Image (cartoon, coloured by chain):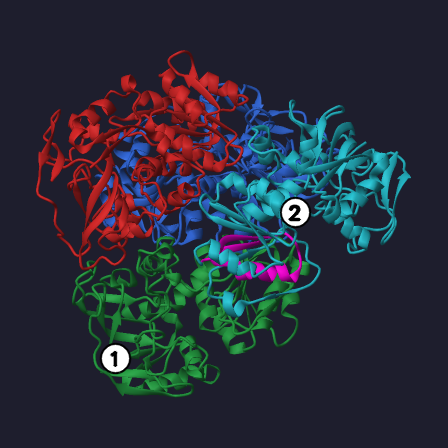
Chain colours: A cyan, B green, C red, D blue
Amino acid sequence: MKALIYRGPGNKALEDRPKPTIQDAGDAIVRVTRTTICGTDLHILKGDVATCAPGRVLGHEGVGVVDSVGAGVSSFKQGDRVLISCITACGRCEYCRRGMYSHCTTGGWILGNEIDGTQAEYVRIPHADTSLYPIPAQAEEEALVMLSDILPTGFECGVLNGKVEPGSTVAIVGSGPIGLAALLTAQFYSPAQIIMIDLDDNRLEMAKRFGATGAINSGKGDAAEQVKAMTGGRGVDTAIEAVGVPATFLLCQDLVAPGGVIANIGVHGTKVDLHLETLWSRNISITTRLVDTATTPMLLKVVQSGRIDPARLITHHFKLADILDAYDTFSRAAATGALKVIIET
Amino acid sequence: MKALIYRGPGNKALEDRPKPTIQDAGDAIVRVTRTTICGTDLHILKGDVATCAPGRVLGHEGVGVVDSVGAGVSSFKQGDRVLISCITACGRCEYCRRGMYSHCTTGGWILGNEIDGTQAEYVRIPHADTSLYPIPAQAEEEALVMLSDILPTGFECGVLNGKVEPGSTVAIVGSGPIGLAALLTAQFYSPAQIIMIDLDDNRLEMAKRFGATGAINSGKGDAAEQVKAMTGGRGVDTAIEAVGVPATFLLCQDLVAPGGVIANIGVHGTKVDLHLETLWSRNISITTRLVDTATTPMLLKVVQSGRIDPARLITHHFKLADILDAYDTFSRAAATGALKVIIET
Amino acid sequence: MKALIYRGPGNKALEDRPKPTIQDAGDAIVRVTRTTICGTDLHILKGDVATCAPGRVLGHEGVGVVDSVGAGVSSFKQGDRVLISCITACGRCEYCRRGMYSHCTTGGWILGNEIDGTQAEYVRIPHADTSLYPIPAQAEEEALVMLSDILPTGFECGVLNGKVEPGSTVAIVGSGPIGLAALLTAQFYSPAQIIMIDLDDNRLEMAKRFGATGAINSGKGDAAEQVKAMTGGRGVDTAIEAVGVPATFLLCQDLVAPGGVIANIGVHGTKVDLHLETLWSRNISITTRLVDTATTPMLLKVVQSGRIDPARLITHHFKLADILDAYDTFSRAAATGALKVIIET
Amino acid sequence: MKALIYRGPGNKALEDRPKPTIQDAGDAIVRVTRTTICGTDLHILKGDVATCAPGRVLGHEGVGVVDSVGAGVSSFKQGDRVLISCITACGRCEYCRRGMYSHCTTGGWILGNEIDGTQAEYVRIPHADTSLYPIPAQAEEEALVMLSDILPTGFECGVLNGKVEPGSTVAIVGSGPIGLAALLTAQFYSPAQIIMIDLDDNRLEMAKRFGATGAINSGKGDAAEQVKAMTGGRGVDTAIEAVGVPATFLLCQDLVAPGGVIANIGVHGTKVDLHLETLWSRNISITTRLVDTATTPMLLKVVQSGRIDPARLITHHFKLADILDAYDTFSRAAATGALKVIIET
């Protein structure tokens, strides 16, 4: 089968690989019908992710059809249409019992990282019973690719951890795909204000179309001051960090109101300054989270009800044969306007 | 009346002052019967608290008897025995309605800071209806002085924010009075382990008598490693920072388990390093809080039930005339073994 | 001044009464600009409310302008535009500190019940600081009359107690004004389904326009069976009782899913059967609540943000001089189509 | 092997049966070392449990050693010492993902009910990975038999649902084994008062030794009045129903305070009266629950920490050969003083 292979820093290729086979009683082999590319895949290609060795099939998102299952799989059978979670969960360990699937002792984020992933014609999914989700009969498959990772990430790490609630004020720092996913799902809770902050006016325009009530270009003035002005001088109840660099985390500290939450989504590569000399008395919380995809069933229901259309995050389509073009388009997002790209196999 | 006056950095004196009078319909004048000294008073005397001007009567803790009340006070009358909260709360503003009294727009921590405090024969208490608490008939007054500040601080900022629960594991970094207050109140929730960490073996011994299940002298080896060894390699569910310097906050980052909480109590004077390059994916929370004393009614009930004896925190007694000796004893705690000192007026 | 007086069962009149005066330091006198009629007023007129004596000015909802305040009032002054809460709260007692204003030991629901109410040119509001809310500058006054009682009642007793959440399923039994208030505010949380149940097709039509995803006329077939059919056989996560008779409470027991909540809003006059022989093992909750109006600040923010328009509940307008006509229209709602009627003074 | 067989209403026998075998990839066969008898077993013997057919091996509690496992079991292997949960959970269905194992679509309470149970030398446990728990190395096996059912039942259905908290007031109606399990676990949260109510003075004496702060014989006077007198006229924050008849549920309605919870544990055979004409405005909750055993890991930690000794519930010991005597002793608890009886195989 064809598969996109990480060949070491700066190097990738579409190669022929043997179709994966059942290795454990809990495994399923899934024929991938649609996958996508994540910002994390670009991190891997830079050599930033030590757990991902050269030779790995990349990709941790996608939908497909069950091809075969191991003896211990009871929830799925050949032919079932399934959503693949980016997080593999055994459902048995102490972390899984607490819904903290990201820290599953034999799973977590392993797809396209420690084991071969979804940017291929077939993928092996361990712990299939608790790592796949059935696709409802009338569902639009393509939209559901957004539920593998980006939508639960924005929702769990940003919106739920950030305790967004009716009438509250929210600032989202970073208007890329993950910030927009947080923006879409924050609206589940009817906050009074959602202010998007970014350096790119095009992304801010898009954010307004996605429901932002305000937009600030942080390259053109003091963003914290503008947020204060928009919120009666208080700052926001929820500051969502969706970039992953020290400057944006610092900005969140400046714009969070007393009693508020800084909900970090960004993948950080270095330490940051935490201004406890100010914040110690401000009754704030800071949260971090690797997505658990514990809310996938909830998100499936909301999508099915029509209250949200995650397909709005999809900007481009490619065939698997053209996945190198897809990577090119996705990696030059500022120029191409790419949010999420769909790859059909 | 006699009062302890802050006369600028490094300078304090017991002086004669006029007895305070009602200035606002919501005021009460309270004859102080017992007060105490807080670590924050020492901070003020170092010149570290900009809001506290020379000439101020210090002190924000105590019990006493109502001497007179303004026209708007309905819950208290002359002769009532009362507990004075360190936090003044109007009960009306948006923060007070959320129980976040520390951020009351016309109150908060103002006693012995922005207005004259309790280390005197009388004190004026604004917003008396929502800043004083009736002392139950049979209650031991002296023990209740611990409910003005230290016990709710340990409980709210450390235990409640830290989400201590039955069977969980707790580490408390700092075994001074505030760490011990956290230790006492953490036991309300029956955690499986409470590990105290300090540099002083005497304090650690005391912590064991107060209920600690383990004690680590962080000056004699790697405290984080020892905590990991005591918790099956995982680290603790709740790490309580009760010191207020970068090194102890850093230690908390090293010993918190995935999914855990770092609950900060310490008053920090400088920024700290936050290692988001590790923590971004560990599903942790960090909380800060200036005590709200919102749990004072609950704490009064627990103390009345006999499940906790806060008088155990009291090590020394002085008369108001000898308050300079009391400051001396309290400020040399390592040598004197002082935890909390009671000053009778 | 003119005032609508309860003169005993079945008897009411518009009479001349002296303008109320300040009786307590915490009082405010408010010139009422708009008020409305509640179903509870009809209960009083039937003689069902023992606490309301003949001679009482009715009404517990409205907006107006502060005319004068007592010495202890600090948040409001003459000329301020205010929203009057149906619940009077001292902000000081144990219940108020828990946000359970409905059970304030010197307040609760007393307006137009134990003391004179709002269906008059002026009204005296005790505990004004914590029982009135400032009206934002640009706000539409008329819509805010819905925030005195009906909107917080639907929201607190139905939606919050019912734990409505994204993707969940909701049934609301009763499509009158209070059921519609629950319907409007349930949408703050983006449930997947909201099924309205009533005996009146007109009301069900209105419910669909207000956002219901399904409607069942319980007089034309088995409502519980239909709800099961609409929810994959499970029943609903949240069943909101908005009528107050045994039959509707029984229906809620039939249609709630395992793990679900029955949130009672209805004012019941008799005991009901609770089928614990079935429900003991179904992991459900049943909640009751007299509205606390603790969420009024939140609701004001949501209304100001434009996410909800409570004026949609208003169907008729009258002058105070014509309040008897207003009562007639409101009491014959099936014929007149009345939901809420506004009375201008 | 020997097994205790239900032979129809009023009829049981110790019979020889074939040793069970693996039927499904997720099964484990466990050699039972200790089991016990539950009040529910007596219900079955009366013919009250329709799902339990004659010929069934009874028993849903116990500890043992793994004898063999199916191909899909990954957490346990032959020789592991295990605690058997009374609830069988697949860990995969929607209910299991929410921690509501009692309603597992292919599990729930099936042991000794729909499939053969633990009062035998061997038992087959479906979904073994998520229905068994490893016994810690130093643990006392016998005490852990209390964690199969009775302790999580008292804790989850009574204490957690009842929201017991520090300083709160609790009444437990019924001082049998399940009421005592609630009493033991309520103390995890340091309530100020726990008042036990029963008709039997001996059981009330035992309750005091288990930590009750008050005891009321409801056959000798008005229990609700006495509870009010003990709680300053308010009633209790948490009323736990641990009997299962209309009179005790009615009593709970009389003694719960405004804002309180009635947490039902009792297995009810008939409907009860719910006095909504009073309770509609009292802001209370009523909860029901079939135990989920979701807290078994937490309870294991608390027991291991030594904060609770569940072995105090054990009053008698028998060999499996004498299980008919054990049933006799257990069923005549008033005369024999039996709480829980241990049966060794």
Residue C51 can be seen, yes or no: yes
Q: Quadrant of the N terminus of chain B?
A: bottom left
Disc 2 crowd rating (10 Å Cα; few below 14, some 14-19, many 20+) is few
Label 2: chain letter: A
Please tell me whether mark 2 sits on a helix, a strand or a loop.
helix
Residue D135, disc: none
Q: Which residue is mark 2?
A: A202
Q: Which residue is mark 1?
A: B345
Q: Residue furthest right?
A: A16
Image quarter for residue D257? top left
Image quarter for residue C243? top left
Left or right, D47 with reference to C245: right
Question: Where are the magenta residues, as a range?
Answer: A234-263
Q: Nearer the viewer, residue B77 or C54?
A: C54
Left or right, A22 with reference to A262: right
Q: Is residue D290 above or below residue C94?
A: above
Image quarter for residue D190? bottom left
